[in-house]
Amino acid sequence: MDRKPLVVGNWKMHGTRKEARELLEGIKARLGGLREVEVGVAPPFTALETTAEVLADDQIKVASQNVHYASSGAFTGEVSPGMLKELGVDYAIVGHSERRSLFWESDEMINRKVRAALGAGLGVILCVGETLDEREAGRTWQKVSFQVKSGLEGVDAQEMQGVVIAYEPVWAIGTGRTATPAQAQSVHADLRALLVELYGHEVAQRTRLIYGGSVKPDNAAELMREPDIDGALVGGASLKADSFDAIVLASRP
Ligand code: PGA
């Protein structure tokens, strides 16, 4: 089964609306017409509306970096799935390691977010990944499989159509230290096998498993050549149109 590669730029807390517009114009000019790769950008909440406007006539997708699980209520500082949907957001990133570690998001909370986002018709990019200590202690798969199973609890095969899993080893995020293609492929293959167990062969073959953690123009192609790596979640290198463009082009099938 063909899986269309997905490359999403996670801008993190970078970009005023003005800066977002400039970067988006650069990305649009280079990638607006590309059909072989699904491209997305995840700006800060404050630039989402601008982003949706600039990309209105384009194939490029809009993602949020977070989402709350409730549809409304007394949750100061939070943003609901429906509010994002209204802005034209296509995907919500859920469970990024920075959310887990800096903002104490639990697996239970992440699962609630996944289900709420899917329920509102948003796609979900569920992030999972082990720390360096866990890898060195041989607990990579224990950690990653637990995060996937708990993140997807209560999500059925039909809803899996809206789910992308991003494997992002914590030790590779923002460090310049990428997982080798073999290390990443090994976890992705295990993830695919886990999806077979949970949802059967068809869902497992259809679901995109993307890699994140110091993806750069010079390492993207070798990562993307691996059979179970279906794209990338890109942090630092997504903040410049030319490096993001190079990664997207390297992800073409
Ligand atoms: P990085 O970030 O590409 O800067 O390592 C990836 C991510 O956090 O999604």
Image (tube, rainbow, N blue to C red):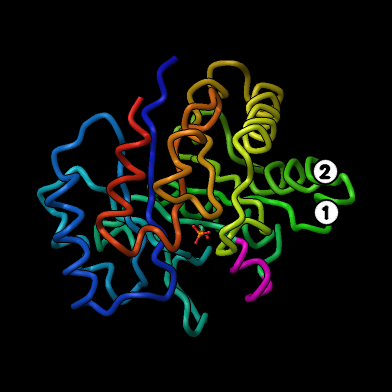
Q: Cβ(mark 2) to ligand 1 < 8 Å?
A: no
Residue 147 at what x, y percent from top left? Answer: 71, 49
* Rendered position, 93 above or below 22: above
Q: Quadrant of residue 15?
A: bottom left
* Rendered position, 18 above or below 219: below
User: In the figure, is residue 7 to the left or right of 104?
Assistant: left
Element marked by disc 2: helix
- The amino acid type of the residue labelled 1 equals Glu
Q: Quadrant of residue 52?
A: bottom left
Magenta run includes residue 99: yes
Q: Which residues are magenta?
A: 97-104
Residue 122 at what x, y percent from top left? Answer: 39, 49
**Foreground pick, 97 / 107:** 97
Q: Quadrant of residue 96?
A: bottom right
Residue 13 at what x, y percent from top left? Answer: 42, 75
Instruction: Give the residue number, with chain letter if any, for mark 1.
Output: 134
Say if mark 2 contacts mark 1, CB within 8 Å. yes
Instruction: Give the residue number, with chain letter if any, for mark 2.
Output: 142
Q: Residue furthest bottom?
A: 76
Residues packed near mark 1 inside 10 Å, few (<14), some (14 to 19) or many (20 plus): some
Residues packed near mark 2 inside 10 Å, few (<14), some (14 to 19) or many (20 plus): few
Circle nearer the viewer, 2 or 1:
1
Q: CA distance from mark 2 to mark 1?
A: 9 Å
Residue 156 at what x, y percent from top left? Answer: 58, 33
Mark found first going from the N terminus, 2 or 1? 1
Quadrant (top left, top right, bottom left, bottom right) of the N terminus: top left
User: In the figure, is residue 165 to the left or right of 27?
Assistant: right
- The amino acid type of the residue labelled 2 equals Gln
